[in-house]
Image: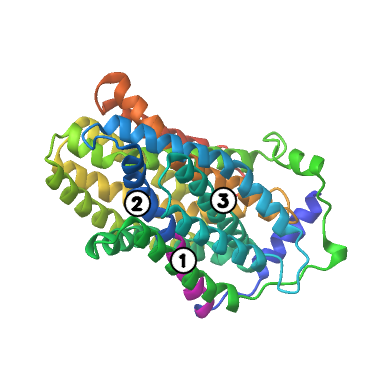
Amino acid sequence: MSADEVTVEATAAALRAPVGRRWIQLFSLAWFGIWIAQLTPIQLLLPEQVAAVLKLDPADWVANVVAFGVVSAIAGVFALVAYPLTGALSDRTLSPFGRRRPWIAAGAVLFAIGLVLLGVQSSIVGVTVFWVVTLVGFCVLTAALTAVISDQVPVGQRGTISGWMAAPQPVGALVGLLAVLALGLSLFAGYALVAVLLVVCVAAFAVRMPDRVLARSERPRLGVAEFLRGFWIDPRTHPDFGWTLLSRVLVNWANALTTTLLLYFLMFGLTLPEGDAETVLLVTTVIYSVFSVIASLWFGGLSDRLGRRKMFVVITAVMQAAAGILLIAAPSEPMVYVAGALSGFGFGAFLAVDQALATEVLPSAVDRGKDLGIMNIAYAIPQALAPLAGAGLVVAVGGFWLLFVAVGVFGIAGAAALAPVKGVR
């Protein structure tokens, strides 16, 4: 894409008509369903299922985390391909229903089917296979859905819209956990419930959203060679994209290491009884959720009004680092609550503003779905690998301090990685 073409595309994106309140409500509802369906299994259902299938001792937390981490890591490998492949195909889809809608619908259905079938598995192979299916469905759905932001939202509104994408994440996680625990649902019933909620929430947006039909003459080529080359976006040619991607990977590692092993830190780091640890975890999750929602909506809109993205992403990345540093300096129950507030506020704001920033550093308008798919890998891979990596750090030193050192290092490095970005303020 030439410099003139980039300028034309940036101008067109800036001049698009703002999306309306109804569009925003349905878009946010779709993400609410997605976050419930992804985070409830990750935080509760899947670890319990892996432990039950392998008949692991609940007190042997290292064996439990490693087993869950292996299943998660295998699925993460498939996400590496599913995200950019779906994005590239949706960029080129010729359909009377538009180019993104078919992939949103297909991803939601695959995601839901994977969840339901996962709920009836009684072997570790079956659990792994259908978690892969579930995560691929998640990738297909979210790759197409994030591309809609670049397709339809003007640059000056993208922080606000990204805030409404990020805000439902902690709410969805909390609602999913409370629903399964309060209703006393079995594994199958839990998986089935979140699958139904997913389809209902996504369908409302998929049916109502506008989606321009791609003309055959506009369709770029996509051969195997072109697709494989598309995985590599030269950071020397597109440095802003490269630095933004690196920053996103690092900050997501900081957040994933903090959240995925928190229960084990409470039980084995602070030596709280299991019941007390679960209560502290629930309270911390509520604190995290409240601060995350406030920050994502506030900072997303503020970044639009001020026309600045980079400054806010740097601040929120440092807040992620601070949460880890506090837990090294003063590991205690009150400090867990403070760290939860800092981490929630920082990551909520980061999700909103960084997503808006990412849409402004894409190398090519015609490949925005594929390029955002590559950006989205930075969310999926840390989440998939953090349990295994975090357990390794804890076992290596016989305690949790190195885990929180890694959180601080990743957060600060993520902030520093944005310094060279020139094309976005």
Q: Nearer the viewer, residue 115 or 125?
A: 125
Q: Residue at x 45, y 62 (%)?
A: 163
Residue 67 occupies quadrant: top left
Q: Is residue 338 above or below residue 36?
A: above
Question: Which amino acid type is marked by label 1?
Answer: Leu
Residue 136 tag number:
3
- Earlier sequence position, callout 2 versus callout 1: 2
Q: Residues within 10 Å of mark 2 (few under 14, many from 20)?
A: some
- What whole-number distance in Å separates the C-alpha atoms at marks 2 and 1? 16 Å
Q: Which residues are magenta?
A: 22-34
Q: Is residue 423 visible?
A: no
Q: Residues within 10 Å of mark 1 (few under 14, many from 20)?
A: many
Q: Label 1 belongs to which residue?
A: 198
- The main secondary structure of the magenta stretch is helix
Secondary structure beneath dot 3 equals: helix
Secondary structure beneath dot 1 equals: helix
x%, y% of residue 333? 14, 42
Q: Residue at x 54, y 67 (%)?
A: 157
